[in-house]
Amino acid sequence: MLKKFIALSVSSLLALSMVGCGGASALSNTNEASEEGATYKVGIVQFVDDASLNQIEAAIEAELDAKSAELGVTFNYKDYTYNGQADSSTLNQIAADLVAEKVDIIIPIATPTAMIMQAATEENQIPVVFSAVSDPLTAGLVDSLEAPGANITGTSDAFNTDTLMDLMFAANPAIKSVGLLYNKSEDASTAAIAAAKAYCESKGVEWVEKTGTNNDEVSLAADALVAAKVDAIFTPTDNTIMTAELAIYEKFIEAGIPHYTGADSFALNGAFCGFGVNYVDLGTATADMVVDILVNGADPATTGVQTMSNGIATVNIETAEAIGLAYDMFEGLCDTVKEITTAEEFE
């Protein structure tokens, strides 16, 4: 997997402002079905290294390879795959480079990446198919889920906060205080945190809010929640906390506090429970939308956002044993209960 890490340069930023005409031809590729033997430049931009996003990228690439063989066309993503490492300057640089390269389509993974790629393609209209955007409407990416309205569509890992909170209280009905751990600057967390607060208030349970924007701040926030002696901790699909999970999960184990989170990768990295979508399926669906636009001429403006089924509870059995918390009651409250042990990446 090729990942390019690049420094900000004046020349590339200038390129972004000068490619309005050059990039316009990209969307014209969607007006009619393409012929066998065609080659497409596919930009893939990942927000940051974490287990879920890496899983999505791998699934996208595997499906593009499979469709290449099936359809007799070439999806060249290897020369145009980048990782922004959660840095907005780097992501803007990547956007400028992809526009200058006149790629045929861009696949941003995660909400912050999608927002930057959307801004970079407003004038040149290069199609954008985002992946793992939890709330495309709140992020301002689409007019509606059914009809996005511009050059952008994609797949959503929209999160069902109430169901995860139901799991939390099923495991421990005596909860009196819930910690909320997230990054305030991540749009994907906004709606889920508001829903968690409303859920707690409906039960007369207090909540303690701690935030962080990097690993050091997240570690301090985790310490503060432990000191506050909360009974459980909730984190939505927040990439900042995800990248820090391996550094904080033992703090929660030592305090006997279960961490309930918005993706299975959290559980892989030590959290008690991760709840959400199948990210391999999400990545595959994203790639299929890309193929439909490039090969079949589908229009992003009228191609509805796909929201994946959200009902898989992944429990870290090592963490469950360490904190002495049962999870058999999860059966029947969600679609599937999976067990996992601690590791850095999915196999």
Image (cartoon, grey):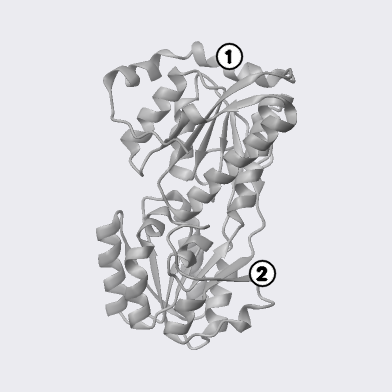
Q: Residues within 10 Å of mark 1 (few under 14, many from 20)?
A: some
Amino acid under disc 1: Ser
First reached walking from the N terminus: tag 1 or tag 2: 1
Q: Residues within 10 Å of mark 2 (few under 14, many from 20)?
A: some
Location of residue 211 with respect to 308 vertically, above or below:
below
Q: Is residue 113 visible?
A: yes
Pointers 1 and 2 in contact (C-beta within 8 Å): no
Query: x and y percent of residue 95 in the render?
Result: 42, 28
In this view, the mark in front (1 or 2): 2
Is label 2 in a helix, a strand or a loop? strand
Residue drawn 64% across and 33% down? 290
Q: Is residue 137 visible?
A: no
Could you say which quadrant of the image residue 220 lies in? Answer: bottom left
Query: x and y percent of residue 62 in the render?
Result: 61, 41
Q: Which residue is mark 2?
A: 336
Q: Which residue is mark 1?
A: 25
Residue drawn 57% across and 76% down? 167
Residue drawn 31% across and 69% down? 222
Q: What is the total number of numbered labels drawn onto the structure image? A: 2
Query: x and y percent of residue 279 in the render?
Result: 58, 53
Looking at the image, residue 20 sits to the left or right of residue 157; the answer is left
Give 63 or 249, whichever is nearer the viewer: 63
Give 52 or 157, whichever is nearer the viewer: 52
Amino acid under disc 2: Thr
Residue drawn 50% across and 30% down? 78
